[in-house]
Amino acid sequence: MRSRLVSLFAAASLAAFAAGATAQTVKIGVVLTYTGVGAEFAQQIDRGMQMFVKLNPNAFAPYKVELVKRDAKNPGGADAKTAAQELITQDKVDIITGVIYSSNAIAMEPVVTAAKKPFLIMNAGTAWITNLSPVIARVSFSMWHAGHAMGDAAAKMMKAKTAVVGYTDYPPGKDSLIAFKTAFEAAGGKVIDEIPMGGPGKVPDFTPFFQRAKDRKPDVFFVFVPAGDHAVGVMKTYGALGMKQAGIRLIGPGDITQDTKLQSMGDAAVGLITVHHYNANLDNPANKRLVAAWKKEYGADSTPDFMAVQGYDGMAAIAHGVRANKGKLDADSFINSLRGWKFDSPRGPISIDPRTRDIVMNEYLSELTKSGGRLVQKNIGTIPAVKDMCKELRVDRCGK
Amino acid sequence: MRAVLELAGRHRLRAWEALPWAAALAAFFVFPNHLAFGTQLLITVLFALSLDLVLGYAGIVTLGHAAFFGAGAYTVGMLAQHLGWNEPLSSLAAAALVAGAIGLASGLVLLRTHGLTLLMLTLCTMALLEEAANMGARYTGGFDGMPGLGFQPLLGIFPFDVLFFRSQYLYALAVLFACFVVVRVLVYSPFGQSLTGIRENLLRMHAVGAPVRARLVLAYAISAALAGVAGGLFTQANAFVNLAVLGLDRAAGVLIILILGGYGRLYGAFVGALAYLLLEHALAKAYPTAWQLGLGLALMAVALYARNGILGIAASLHRRLGGRRAA
């Protein structure tokens, strides 16, 4: 056992040495949760990255790229940290990227900072992560992007006066609550109740929470739950309690209308209004090209979702950084070349904020409608160039 | 007579017992780029060793041992974050105390039960602690945890090595050695013998007048303190702590590791952790999306054909191949 592993390790380090000798290859260390509950997300990001390379074969020219993939296994942090440490010390990667869970990004940060490698985050949405280190840039989102934009839109576009917020009781949920409340009340609305709805681990019975919300008779009911099966439960309960007939409109960030889960939501979801930075029905050339190529590659029933686009844009950012620095990638110069970088993404125009190294992007207000027997998202409004308002308003830890 | 002599000589040090420690030290020089993994491995060994004391020797079946690992981890993390108490050795001692106290308190209540009830109650204790840590996010950092914890250099001389984990590895090795000595002395002491007695024949131990429950509670508390040390080491070595230190994944994982190695054998924790983590690590590296299949097949093979774990195989081989003199 031991001796076999020794030879395995020896072979790996030899391969790393050989790859390091050819200066034209850029090694990208990808840390994603390839197994367990995060596996579905990792697959989206992974495919998004591949799609970028496929659709833009010359983006990295004249440099070659090599992806070294490692499994983060769980949101616990320790495995992700070891993966990052080994990618740097053994595989000698130039860049660390990926990361589904914020807890993993937080655990990995000291290692990447100590090694002075660029750390490009493709998902992990806790707002203050980018404040941890100057080697971090983020192409995904913070919970504040959609939450704040939704609060603003609910008051101004939907003319709501009162709101109840129901949220899953963990950091993204609390972030969403504060973001929504900040914007909604700044625009003249009033949050009349805040309902924690259990943890992210398992899907609860939403009935008591929703009944409490219904009894408060708000104009809108803002719900944050994790993407995936929680969202399906939300829709079922919303329909079963007749909240739509009672005149309470359900709104939320686009995590609850993830494209891959849309068709399992049922008719109660029709009329649901969400704000998010991407949905597969966006009407722009880059998105049309991506969706068409995606369906050709992975089947007509499959669709890219916001995670896939984050992977896609991440590769675009890396390609830009590699070419701008002529293949020499220390953290300072790589991150500096991303400051103010602009790109026409499938989610519309995006850029990296020069000050915060976080993404600036459009948020789309969309309504779920039925078309040809399928649920589709109809875009009914665009909020352009949204920054992470947690850092703009310097709320708590984001004010560092 | 021979059996009595064997029993009397069990505690003697054997030459091969130096081997794991020599190997661990050698690994420091041979694999300088693998010490982050090595540190996790040593911490897991210590955690499994603490479980062996209760499960293997005292026969207490628990599915919530991560409660104490987490208590130790959060003690170190919260002391550093909120009180600026970041001297490693003393905060490790604090971790042992807190975890030991929780072990003592919960042991007093839980160890009135046994079997499945006990199993469920240990699980519940852990779930309660986990939810407390989630709800007290102001103090614990909740799901995201506490980032970027800093600790003073070890003994005031050796700073923690963020990138290569050199000092963490040696530190973890030294702590593991100290704890191992404690456990080894303990299990061969009259106290340890009485634990084995309780495991083997509860009624008879009552009949000879042994204070059964007090012994079990004490063993549980000592084991909890050792698990707390492992948790404290985890926080110090990794510079973060989050909810995963308290989860069922960790509790079940360490149980699998101990059973894989062989419980009630002192070195089962070493062999199990080494085998399990090396296999998992190598497979995950080679097949990031499909490694669980290989690991699952290996565990099934062990469960089907090697009921007593890897050390159990070794022992029966030893018996068959001329080790009869000992038998």
Image (cartoon, rainbow, N blue to C red):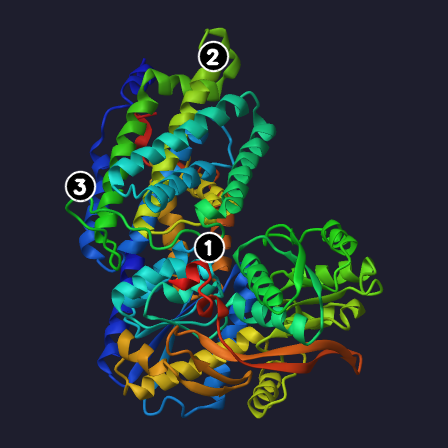
What number is the disc on residue A73?
none
Closest to the observer, B317 or A132: A132
User: Given the image, on which type of amino acid does mark 2 rest?
Assistant: Met
What number is the disc on residue B144?
1
Marks 1 and 2 in Cβ contact (< 8 Å): no
> Which chain is disc 2 placed on?
B
The C terminus of chain A: image quadrant: bottom left
> Which chain is disc 1 placed on?
B
Marks 2 and 3 in Cβ contact (< 8 Å): no
Say what secondary structure mark 2 lies in. Answer: helix
Query: Residue B245: x, y in percent?
Result: 44, 46
Q: Residue at x 46, y 55 (%)?
A: B144
Which is nearer the N-term, disc 2 or disc 3? 3
Mark 2 neighbour class, 10 Å CA radius: few under 14, some 14 to 19, many 20 or more: some
Rounded to the nearest angstrom, the CA distance separating label 2 from label 3 is 45 Å
Q: How many marks?
A: 3
Q: Is residue B288 left or right of residue A43?
A: left
> Which chain is disc 3 placed on?
B
Task: Report the residue marked by disc 2.
Answer: B205
What number is the disc on residue B155?
3
Does any portion of residue A230 appear in the rendered image? Answer: yes
Query: Residue A318: x, y in percent?
Result: 38, 81
Say what secondary structure mark 1 lies in. Answer: loop
Query: Residue B294: x, y in percent?
Result: 47, 58
Mark 3 neighbour class, 10 Å CA radius: few under 14, some 14 to 19, many 20 or more: few
Answer yes or no: are tags 3 and 1 on the same subunit. yes
Question: Quadrant location of residue A188?
Answer: bottom right
Say what secondary structure mark 3 lies in. Answer: loop
User: Given the image, on which type of amino acid does mark 1 rest?
Assistant: Asp
Relative height, residue A61 to residue B279 (above, below)? below
Rounded to the nearest angstrom, the CA distance separating label 3 from label 1 is 30 Å
Q: Is residue B325 left or right of residue A156?
A: left
